[in-house]
Amino acid sequence: METKPSVNTTGRYQLRYRGVECLNCGHPLEISDKYCPNCSQANSTKKLTLKDFFEEFFSNIISYDSKLFRTLGSLLLRPGRITKAYISGQRVSYTNPFRFLLSLAIIYFLLIGFSNNFERLNRLGTESNQLPINFGGSMIEEFDFGEAENDKKQMMAQLDSLELNGLITEKMRIRDSIILADPKRQIEAASQKSFLGSLFRKQEIFSTLIQKDTLYVFDEAKEKYSFDDNWHNKISFNMAQSVIKVKRQPGAYLSSVFSKLPFTTFFFLPVFSIFIWLVYIRKKYTYTDHLIFSFHNQSLFFILLIISYLIDTVFGIDTSGIFVLIFAFYLYKAMRNFYDQGRFKTIVKYIFLNTIFVILAIMGAALLFAGSMFTY
Protein backbone atom coordinates (compact mmCIF):
# COMPACT_ATOMS: atom_id res chain seq x y z
CA MET A 1 0.00 0.00 0.00
CA GLU A 2 1.43 3.35 -1.03
CA THR A 3 2.02 6.07 1.51
CA LYS A 4 0.28 9.33 0.82
CA PRO A 5 2.59 12.33 0.46
CA SER A 6 2.87 14.30 3.68
CA VAL A 7 2.58 18.03 4.08
CA ASN A 8 5.56 19.91 2.73
CA THR A 9 7.87 21.04 5.55
CA THR A 10 10.75 23.44 5.89
CA GLY A 11 14.46 23.00 6.44
CA ARG A 12 16.07 19.63 5.91
CA TYR A 13 12.67 17.93 5.63
CA GLN A 14 11.50 19.59 2.41
CA LEU A 15 10.44 17.17 -0.29
CA ARG A 16 13.32 18.23 -2.53
CA TYR A 17 15.79 16.83 0.02
CA ARG A 18 14.08 13.43 0.35
CA GLY A 19 15.92 10.32 -0.81
CA VAL A 20 14.85 6.88 -1.98
CA GLU A 21 17.21 4.98 0.31
CA CYS A 22 17.97 5.45 4.01
CA LEU A 23 21.48 6.80 4.47
CA ASN A 24 21.76 4.97 7.80
CA CYS A 25 20.49 1.42 7.19
CA GLY A 26 19.93 1.33 3.39
CA HIS A 27 16.21 0.59 3.70
CA PRO A 28 14.30 1.59 0.51
CA LEU A 29 12.18 4.71 0.95
CA GLU A 30 9.60 6.73 -0.90
CA ILE A 31 9.73 10.47 -1.37
CA SER A 32 6.75 10.81 0.99
CA ASP A 33 8.64 9.12 3.85
CA LYS A 34 9.78 11.75 6.31
CA TYR A 35 11.49 9.11 8.48
CA CYS A 36 12.86 5.66 7.76
CA PRO A 37 10.32 3.04 8.95
CA ASN A 38 13.19 0.66 9.73
CA CYS A 39 15.57 2.77 11.86
CA SER A 40 13.62 6.05 12.33
CA GLN A 41 16.37 8.28 10.92
CA ALA A 42 15.16 11.44 9.16
CA ASN A 43 14.91 11.03 5.37
CA SER A 44 17.07 13.91 4.20
CA THR A 45 20.03 14.09 1.82
CA LYS A 46 20.78 17.71 2.69
CA LYS A 47 24.15 18.38 4.35
CA LEU A 48 23.74 19.20 8.04
CA THR A 49 24.35 22.90 8.68
CA LEU A 50 24.88 24.61 12.01
CA LYS A 51 21.34 26.05 11.80
CA ASP A 52 19.87 22.58 11.17
CA PHE A 53 21.88 21.13 14.05
CA PHE A 54 20.55 23.61 16.66
CA GLU A 55 16.98 23.41 15.31
CA GLU A 56 16.97 19.63 15.85
CA PHE A 57 18.57 20.02 19.28
CA PHE A 58 15.90 22.39 20.59
CA SER A 59 13.06 20.45 18.98
CA ASN A 60 14.21 17.32 20.84
CA ILE A 61 14.30 19.25 24.13
CA ILE A 62 10.77 20.54 23.57
CA SER A 63 9.60 17.02 22.70
CA TYR A 64 11.12 15.62 25.90
CA ASP A 65 9.71 18.46 27.99
CA SER A 66 6.21 17.77 26.72
CA LYS A 67 6.52 14.15 27.87
CA LEU A 68 8.01 15.27 31.14
CA PHE A 69 5.24 17.74 31.95
CA ARG A 70 2.57 15.24 30.94
CA THR A 71 4.16 12.59 33.18
CA LEU A 72 4.45 15.01 36.11
CA GLY A 73 0.85 16.14 35.71
CA SER A 74 -0.47 12.60 35.56
CA LEU A 75 1.60 11.50 38.54
CA LEU A 76 0.42 14.39 40.70
CA LEU A 77 -3.23 14.46 39.67
CA ARG A 78 -4.03 10.88 38.69
CA PRO A 79 -2.65 8.46 41.33
CA GLY A 80 -2.47 4.98 39.83
CA ARG A 81 -4.10 6.05 36.58
CA ILE A 82 -0.79 6.80 34.87
CA THR A 83 0.33 3.21 35.47
CA LYS A 84 -2.90 1.88 33.99
CA ALA A 85 -2.43 4.06 30.92
CA TYR A 86 1.21 3.07 30.52
CA ILE A 87 0.73 -0.70 30.76
CA SER A 88 -2.30 -0.51 28.45
CA GLY A 89 -0.03 0.75 25.67
CA GLN A 90 -0.08 4.55 26.01
CA ARG A 91 3.71 4.81 26.33
CA VAL A 92 4.71 7.43 23.77
CA SER A 93 2.98 10.16 25.78
CA TYR A 94 4.96 9.47 28.98
CA THR A 95 8.60 9.19 29.94
CA ASN A 96 10.07 5.77 30.66
CA PRO A 97 9.31 4.94 34.36
CA PHE A 98 12.75 3.48 35.00
CA ARG A 99 14.61 6.43 33.46
CA PHE A 100 12.29 8.93 35.12
CA LEU A 101 12.81 7.45 38.58
CA LEU A 102 16.58 7.25 38.13
CA SER A 103 16.71 10.93 37.09
CA LEU A 104 14.66 12.04 40.10
CA ALA A 105 16.74 9.95 42.51
CA ILE A 106 20.00 11.36 41.17
CA ILE A 107 18.65 14.94 41.34
CA TYR A 108 17.54 14.50 44.95
CA PHE A 109 20.77 12.96 46.19
CA LEU A 110 22.81 15.54 44.30
CA LEU A 111 20.86 18.26 46.14
CA ILE A 112 21.62 16.54 49.43
CA GLY A 113 25.28 16.23 48.49
CA PHE A 114 25.62 19.87 47.41
CA SER A 115 24.14 21.05 50.69
CA ASN A 116 27.42 20.07 52.42
CA ASN A 117 25.43 18.98 55.49
CA PHE A 118 27.43 15.75 55.62
CA GLU A 119 30.77 17.45 55.09
CA ARG A 120 30.16 19.49 58.23
CA LEU A 121 30.30 16.25 60.19
CA ASN A 122 33.99 15.91 59.30
CA ARG A 123 34.77 18.33 62.12
CA LEU A 124 33.52 15.60 64.48
CA GLY A 125 36.08 13.20 63.10
CA THR A 126 38.87 12.05 65.35
CA GLU A 127 42.32 10.75 64.79
CA SER A 128 41.98 7.01 64.42
CA ASN A 129 44.02 6.29 67.52
CA GLN A 130 41.99 8.42 69.91
CA LEU A 131 39.28 5.87 70.58
CA PRO A 132 39.72 2.10 70.94
CA ILE A 133 37.75 -0.09 68.60
CA ASN A 134 37.05 -2.57 71.38
CA PHE A 135 36.30 -0.60 74.55
CA GLY A 136 35.79 -2.27 77.90
CA GLY A 137 37.50 -3.96 80.79
CA SER A 138 37.88 -7.22 78.86
CA MET A 139 40.05 -5.68 76.13
CA ILE A 140 43.37 -6.80 77.61
CA GLU A 141 42.00 -10.28 78.26
CA GLU A 142 41.57 -10.84 74.53
CA PHE A 143 45.30 -10.70 73.81
CA ASP A 144 47.41 -13.82 73.56
CA PHE A 145 50.28 -13.50 76.08
CA GLY A 146 51.59 -16.98 75.40
CA GLU A 147 53.30 -18.34 78.49
CA ALA A 148 53.67 -14.93 80.15
CA GLU A 149 50.51 -15.02 82.23
CA ASN A 150 52.26 -13.05 84.96
CA ASP A 151 52.59 -10.13 82.53
CA LYS A 152 48.86 -10.25 81.98
CA LYS A 153 48.15 -10.17 85.72
CA GLN A 154 50.54 -7.28 86.22
CA MET A 155 48.91 -5.27 83.42
CA MET A 156 45.44 -5.90 84.80
CA ALA A 157 46.59 -4.81 88.25
CA GLN A 158 48.18 -1.72 86.76
CA LEU A 159 44.95 -0.83 84.95
CA ASP A 160 42.98 -1.21 88.15
CA SER A 161 45.27 1.22 89.93
CA LEU A 162 45.07 3.94 87.26
CA GLU A 163 42.90 7.03 87.60
CA LEU A 164 39.79 7.09 85.40
CA ASN A 165 41.00 10.04 83.30
CA GLY A 166 44.07 8.18 82.14
CA LEU A 167 42.47 4.78 81.80
CA ILE A 168 41.59 4.90 78.09
CA THR A 169 44.96 6.27 77.01
CA GLU A 170 46.87 3.74 79.06
CA LYS A 171 44.78 0.81 77.86
CA MET A 172 45.33 1.87 74.27
CA ARG A 173 49.07 2.20 74.81
CA ILE A 174 49.22 -1.28 76.31
CA ARG A 175 47.01 -2.65 73.54
CA ASP A 176 49.26 -1.23 70.83
CA SER A 177 52.46 -2.43 72.51
CA ILE A 178 51.13 -5.99 72.81
CA ILE A 179 50.06 -6.06 69.16
CA LEU A 180 53.32 -4.59 67.89
CA ALA A 181 55.38 -7.01 70.02
CA ASP A 182 54.15 -10.03 68.01
CA PRO A 183 51.48 -9.22 65.37
CA LYS A 184 51.56 -12.69 63.85
CA ARG A 185 50.79 -14.37 67.19
CA GLN A 186 47.84 -12.03 67.75
CA ILE A 187 46.42 -12.74 64.27
CA GLU A 188 46.80 -16.50 64.76
CA ALA A 189 45.08 -16.28 68.15
CA ALA A 190 42.25 -14.23 66.62
CA SER A 191 41.77 -16.91 63.94
CA GLN A 192 40.66 -19.37 66.65
CA LYS A 193 37.59 -17.30 67.46
CA SER A 194 34.17 -17.43 65.77
CA PHE A 195 33.81 -15.86 62.32
CA LEU A 196 32.55 -12.46 63.51
CA GLY A 197 34.69 -12.48 66.62
CA SER A 198 37.75 -13.23 64.53
CA LEU A 199 36.80 -10.58 61.97
CA PHE A 200 36.48 -7.76 64.49
CA ARG A 201 39.54 -8.88 66.49
CA LYS A 202 41.71 -8.92 63.36
CA GLN A 203 40.28 -5.58 62.32
CA GLU A 204 41.48 -4.12 65.62
CA ILE A 205 44.95 -5.61 65.18
CA PHE A 206 45.28 -4.41 61.60
CA SER A 207 44.08 -0.94 62.64
CA THR A 208 47.01 -0.65 65.02
CA LEU A 209 49.48 -1.89 62.42
CA ILE A 210 48.13 0.47 59.73
CA GLN A 211 48.47 3.47 62.04
CA LYS A 212 51.87 2.61 63.53
CA ASP A 213 53.58 1.15 60.46
CA THR A 214 51.82 3.25 57.78
CA LEU A 215 50.65 0.24 55.79
CA TYR A 216 48.57 0.89 52.67
CA VAL A 217 47.76 -2.55 51.24
CA PHE A 218 47.50 -6.05 52.69
CA ASP A 219 50.50 -7.29 50.68
CA GLU A 220 52.74 -4.93 52.65
CA ALA A 221 51.49 -6.35 55.95
CA LYS A 222 51.77 -9.92 54.66
CA GLU A 223 55.36 -9.43 53.53
CA LYS A 224 56.48 -7.65 56.71
CA TYR A 225 54.82 -9.94 59.27
CA SER A 226 54.43 -13.19 57.28
CA PHE A 227 50.65 -13.28 57.65
CA ASP A 228 48.69 -16.02 55.91
CA ASP A 229 47.47 -14.94 52.49
CA ASN A 230 43.77 -15.80 52.91
CA TRP A 231 40.52 -13.98 52.17
CA HIS A 232 39.60 -13.56 55.84
CA ASN A 233 42.77 -11.63 56.60
CA LYS A 234 42.30 -9.49 53.50
CA ILE A 235 38.71 -8.63 54.44
CA SER A 236 39.78 -7.76 57.98
CA PHE A 237 42.57 -5.52 56.67
CA ASN A 238 40.26 -3.70 54.26
CA MET A 239 37.70 -3.27 57.02
CA ALA A 240 40.36 -1.77 59.29
CA GLN A 241 41.30 0.75 56.61
CA SER A 242 37.67 1.72 56.09
CA VAL A 243 36.98 2.15 59.81
CA ILE A 244 39.97 4.47 60.14
CA LYS A 245 38.74 6.60 57.22
CA VAL A 246 35.19 6.72 58.60
CA LYS A 247 36.39 7.86 62.02
CA ARG A 248 38.54 10.57 60.51
CA GLN A 249 35.93 11.84 58.02
CA PRO A 250 32.41 10.69 58.98
CA GLY A 251 30.80 13.29 56.71
CA ALA A 252 32.66 12.07 53.64
CA TYR A 253 31.61 8.50 54.48
CA LEU A 254 27.92 9.45 54.68
CA SER A 255 28.22 11.35 51.39
CA SER A 256 29.69 8.23 49.80
CA VAL A 257 26.82 6.10 51.12
CA PHE A 258 24.16 8.54 49.89
CA SER A 259 25.74 8.65 46.43
CA LYS A 260 24.97 4.94 46.10
CA LEU A 261 21.34 5.19 47.19
CA PRO A 262 19.86 6.02 43.74
CA PHE A 263 21.27 2.80 42.34
CA THR A 264 20.39 0.78 45.45
CA THR A 265 16.76 1.79 44.88
CA PHE A 266 16.66 -0.26 41.68
CA PHE A 267 17.72 -3.40 43.52
CA PHE A 268 15.27 -2.76 46.34
CA LEU A 269 12.09 -2.05 44.34
CA PRO A 270 12.18 -5.28 42.27
CA VAL A 271 12.28 -7.27 45.52
CA PHE A 272 9.42 -5.24 47.00
CA SER A 273 7.39 -5.73 43.81
CA ILE A 274 7.45 -9.48 44.42
CA PHE A 275 5.39 -8.91 47.58
CA ILE A 276 2.96 -6.67 45.67
CA TRP A 277 2.57 -9.42 43.07
CA LEU A 278 1.87 -11.99 45.83
CA VAL A 279 -0.68 -9.74 47.54
CA TYR A 280 -2.51 -9.12 44.26
CA ILE A 281 -1.84 -12.54 42.75
CA ARG A 282 -5.50 -12.96 41.73
CA LYS A 283 -5.37 -9.82 39.63
CA LYS A 284 -4.64 -9.94 35.92
CA TYR A 285 -1.45 -7.90 36.24
CA THR A 286 2.01 -9.33 35.58
CA TYR A 287 5.06 -8.83 37.77
CA THR A 288 6.30 -6.14 35.38
CA ASP A 289 3.04 -4.22 35.80
CA HIS A 290 3.54 -4.21 39.57
CA LEU A 291 7.14 -3.08 39.09
CA ILE A 292 6.03 -0.13 36.93
CA PHE A 293 3.47 0.74 39.61
CA SER A 294 6.32 0.78 42.18
CA PHE A 295 8.48 2.95 39.91
CA HIS A 296 5.69 5.51 39.46
CA ASN A 297 4.93 5.75 43.18
CA GLN A 298 8.60 5.96 44.11
CA SER A 299 9.01 8.73 41.51
CA LEU A 300 6.23 10.70 43.18
CA PHE A 301 7.95 10.14 46.53
CA PHE A 302 11.20 11.66 45.20
CA ILE A 303 9.27 14.59 43.71
CA LEU A 304 7.79 15.31 47.14
CA LEU A 305 11.22 14.97 48.76
CA ILE A 306 12.70 17.46 46.28
CA ILE A 307 9.87 19.95 46.88
CA SER A 308 10.19 19.53 50.65
CA TYR A 309 13.96 20.04 50.50
CA LEU A 310 13.64 23.22 48.42
CA ILE A 311 10.98 24.66 50.74
CA ASP A 312 13.04 23.83 53.83
CA THR A 313 16.16 25.38 52.28
CA VAL A 314 14.43 28.61 51.24
CA PHE A 315 12.26 29.19 54.32
CA GLY A 316 14.34 27.42 56.96
CA ILE A 317 11.49 25.17 58.14
CA ASP A 318 10.92 21.42 58.35
CA THR A 319 8.13 20.15 56.06
CA SER A 320 9.25 16.53 55.78
CA GLY A 321 6.45 15.25 58.04
CA ILE A 322 3.77 17.00 55.99
CA PHE A 323 5.04 15.58 52.72
CA VAL A 324 5.31 12.08 54.18
CA LEU A 325 1.62 12.28 55.13
CA ILE A 326 0.79 13.52 51.62
CA PHE A 327 2.62 10.55 50.11
CA ALA A 328 0.89 8.13 52.50
CA PHE A 329 -2.52 9.34 51.32
CA TYR A 330 -1.35 9.40 47.68
CA LEU A 331 -0.19 5.77 47.88
CA TYR A 332 -3.58 4.68 49.23
CA LYS A 333 -5.37 6.44 46.37
CA ALA A 334 -2.94 4.95 43.84
CA MET A 335 -3.63 1.44 45.11
CA ARG A 336 -7.38 2.04 45.00
CA ASN A 337 -7.33 3.43 41.47
CA PHE A 338 -4.90 0.91 39.99
CA TYR A 339 -6.13 -2.32 41.57
CA ASP A 340 -9.84 -1.40 41.75
CA GLN A 341 -10.55 -2.92 45.16
CA GLY A 342 -12.73 -1.79 48.04
CA ARG A 343 -11.57 0.39 50.90
CA PHE A 344 -11.26 -2.39 53.50
CA LYS A 345 -9.17 -4.72 51.31
CA THR A 346 -7.02 -1.82 50.16
CA ILE A 347 -6.37 -0.64 53.73
CA VAL A 348 -5.39 -4.16 54.89
CA LYS A 349 -3.02 -4.63 51.95
CA TYR A 350 -1.77 -1.07 52.36
CA ILE A 351 -0.74 -1.73 55.98
CA PHE A 352 0.83 -5.08 55.13
CA LEU A 353 2.83 -3.79 52.14
CA ASN A 354 4.05 -0.73 54.01
CA THR A 355 5.24 -2.95 56.86
CA ILE A 356 7.14 -5.09 54.36
CA PHE A 357 8.51 -1.92 52.76
CA VAL A 358 9.87 -0.63 56.08
CA ILE A 359 11.45 -4.00 56.92
CA LEU A 360 13.11 -4.26 53.50
CA ALA A 361 14.25 -0.62 53.70
CA ILE A 362 15.91 -1.22 57.08
CA MET A 363 17.60 -4.38 55.81
CA GLY A 364 18.72 -2.62 52.64
CA ALA A 365 20.11 0.35 54.58
CA ALA A 366 21.97 -1.97 56.96
CA LEU A 367 23.51 -3.90 54.08
CA LEU A 368 24.45 -0.68 52.31
CA PHE A 369 26.16 0.81 55.35
CA ALA A 370 27.91 -2.48 56.13
CA GLY A 371 29.03 -2.93 52.53
CA SER A 372 30.23 0.66 52.38
CA MET A 373 32.19 0.11 55.58
CA PHE A 374 34.14 -2.67 53.82
CA THR A 375 34.70 -0.78 50.57
CA TYR A 376 35.02 2.89 51.60
Image (cartoon, grey):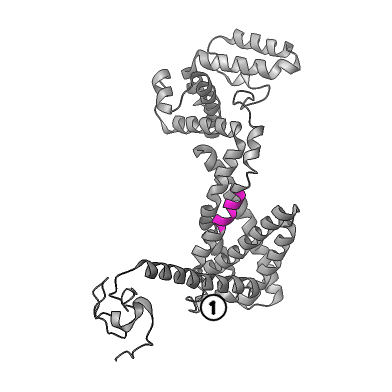
The answer to whether residue 252 is above or below residue 356 is above
Residue found at x 70% / y 70%: 347
Q: Position of residue 302 (x, y in %)?
A: 61, 60
108 within the magenta span: yes
Q: Amino acid at mark 1?
A: Ala
Magenta stretch: give its range. 105-113
The answer to whether residue 232 is above or below residue 261 is above
The answer to whether residue 25 is above or below residue 147 is below
| Residue 119 visible in rendering | yes
- Out of 139 and 27, give the one closest to the viewer: 27
- Residue 3 falls in image quadrant: bottom left
Q: Position of residue 244 (x, y in %)?
A: 56, 30
- Residue 23 falls in image quadrant: bottom left
Residue found at x 42% / y 67%: 54
Count of marks, rendered view: 1
Q: Main secondary structure of the magenta part?
A: helix
- Out of 226 and 373, give the one closest to the viewer: 373
Q: Secondary structure at mark 1?
A: helix
Q: Position of residue 331 (x, y in %)?
A: 66, 68
Report the residue marked by disc 1. 85
The answer to whether residue 370 is above or below residue 310 is above
Locate the N terminus and report the quarter of the image it occupies. bottom left
